Amino acid sequence: MKRIAVCPGSFDPITLGHLDIITRASKLFDEVIVLISKNAGKAQASFTPAERMYLIEKATEGMENVVIDILDGLLADYVRNINAIAIVKGLRAVSDFEYEFQMALANKKLYDGAETVFLTTKSENMYLSSSIVKQIAYFGGDISHFVPECVLEDIKKRLVKENKNYEY
């Protein structure tokens, strides 16, 4: 039986932190589904789900066991429907754990057929989030150390404040 894991997130946009977790999960499972989901607690997204899918596909090119999908519903239902055995979540700090632990318990209550697996981030990614990338890019800062090189220009085109020509 294929060991399938789901790695959910908003990925708005994908960062090197996300890519690190996806890469490490791909070594642990037969198939990893990077699941673009809507976070009801976050403001409107900068990229559409289709654009985020494109960016993730570019960033994970060559990872044969990584698949990208989009979710508009409950994670537990999705995991059940595809017979996944795990939900993979990255943790940056203790503050992430409290929220993710609550989500893991809720998902387990909704579907007990999958375990939540927490992967800790590399130390260089502890502060990194899509929100920080968006804020730095908006004001013309250098985001090249925060996002995969293959999607850097795509992200800059969308996020750098309009009518300003910033040099990196």
Image (cartoon, rainbow, N blue to C red):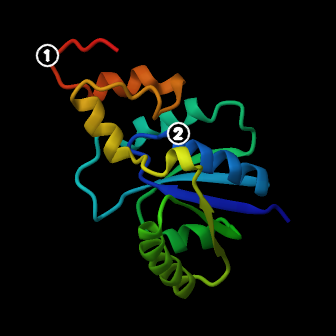
Spatial CA span between label 2 and label 1:
27 Å
Front position in the image: 42 or 91: 91
Which residue extends farthest right?
1
Which numbered marker is on residue 163? 1
Q: Secondary structure under badge 2? A: helix
Q: Is residue 14 left or right of residue 39?
A: right
Q: Quadrant of the C terminus?
A: top left
Asked if residue 47 can be seen in this view, the reply is: no
**Left or right position of 63 against 124:** right
Residue ranking furthest to the front: 123
* Residue at 75 percent of width and 39 percent of height: 64
67 and 41: which is toward the camera = 41
**As drawn, 66 above or below 100:** above
Q: Position of residue 165 (x, y in %)?
A: 21, 12
**Farthest residue, direction bottom:** 109
* Local SS, label 1: loop
Q: Pointer 1: residues within 10 angstroms few (<14), some, or many (20+)?
A: few
Say which residue appears at 53% left-offset and 77% top-offset.
104
Q: Position of residue 59 (x, y in %)?
A: 57, 32
Q: Is residue 139 above or below residue 116?
A: above
Amino acid type at mark 1: Asn
Determine which of the numbered discs, if any, sits on residue 16 in the image. 2
User: Which residue reaches farthest left?
Assistant: 163
Q: Between label 2 and label 1, give the one nearer the viewer.
A: 2
Q: Residue at 21% x, 29% y: name it.
A: 139
Mark yes or no: residue 81 visible: yes
Mark number, residue 64: none
| x 47%, y 40%: residue | 15
Residue 6 higher or lower than 150, as above or below: below
The quarter of the displayed image where residue 89 is located: bottom right
Q: Of the residues shown, which amino acid type is indicated by label 2? A: Leu
Cβ atoms under marks 2 and 1 closer than 8 Å:
no
